Amino acid sequence: MNDFKKPNDIWTARWNDRYSQEEFVYGEEPNNYLKEQITKLSVGKILFPAEGEGRNAVYAAQLGWDVSAFDISIEGKNKALKLAQKNQVTIDYKIGALETLDFQSEQFDAIALIYAHFPANIKSIYHKSFDKYLKKNGTIIFEAFSKKHIDYVTANEKVGGPKDIDSLFSIEEIKSDFLNYEIIELVEQEIELNEGIYHNGKGSVIRFIGRKK
């Protein structure tokens, strides 16, 4: 999970500080929705934006996927590579904002956006940019906090997530950001989170599975 602006700014410092803790702050186990959905797909090449400490990327690599990931936090990358080594897998993990990286057109069979909360002014731009890196018939796996989550995090900070509503998501925004996709699933629902020390309690999320037309 991460917020993106340009590297070397306050966002980078924020996430480096969080990920510099010894423990894995969102745990070492993969996100439940990712775990449920990725097994429905044929193994191929997958990208994890805003991958933080690598729990989801490492899980995909354990399943045989060719895994790429990126984040702005070098501390996140360090933890991810440590986790990969512990689980005897390899992942290609880059540091930087999306526009500075050298991903190729139609490189990936799937892109997994798991709590990838980009700043409000670029989140839709990023979503639309991912399309060019995804192959035709490729899959988006998405889970992140919905706009209703503002009430949940206000009541219980331990559940985590952005505290500004513009950084949260709506079903309408996801439909708009991923126009060129067959909607396999798109729901807003309350879930119980138990992921490390920063995702604990009831929250409201958007879950989306889309197939590129």
Image (cartoon, rainbow, N blue to C red):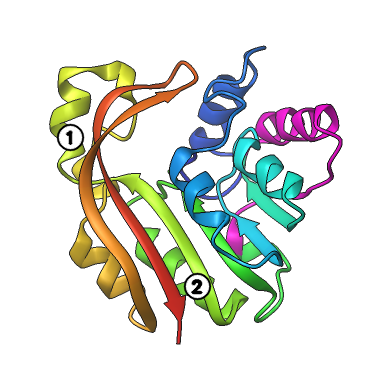
Q: Which residue is mark 2?
A: 129
Q: Which residue is mark 1?
A: 150
Q: Position of residue 42 (x, y in %)?
A: 65, 68
Marks 2 & 1, CB-CB < 8 Å contact = no
Q: Is residue 94 magenta?
A: yes
Q: Which residues are magenta?
A: 73-98
Q: Is residue 21 magenta?
A: no
The residue sitting at the top extreme is: 22
Determine whether 110 is above or below 92 in the image: below
Q: Secondary structure at mark 2?
A: helix
Q: Toward which corner of the image does residue 204 lie, by quadrant?
A: top left
Determine whether 121 is above or below 106 in the image: above
Which sits earlier in the primary sequence, circle 2 or circle 1?
2
Determine whether 96 is above or below 201 in the image: below
Disc 1 marks which amino acid? Ile
165 or 142: nearer the eye? 142
Q: Residue at x 66, y 71 (%)?
A: 108
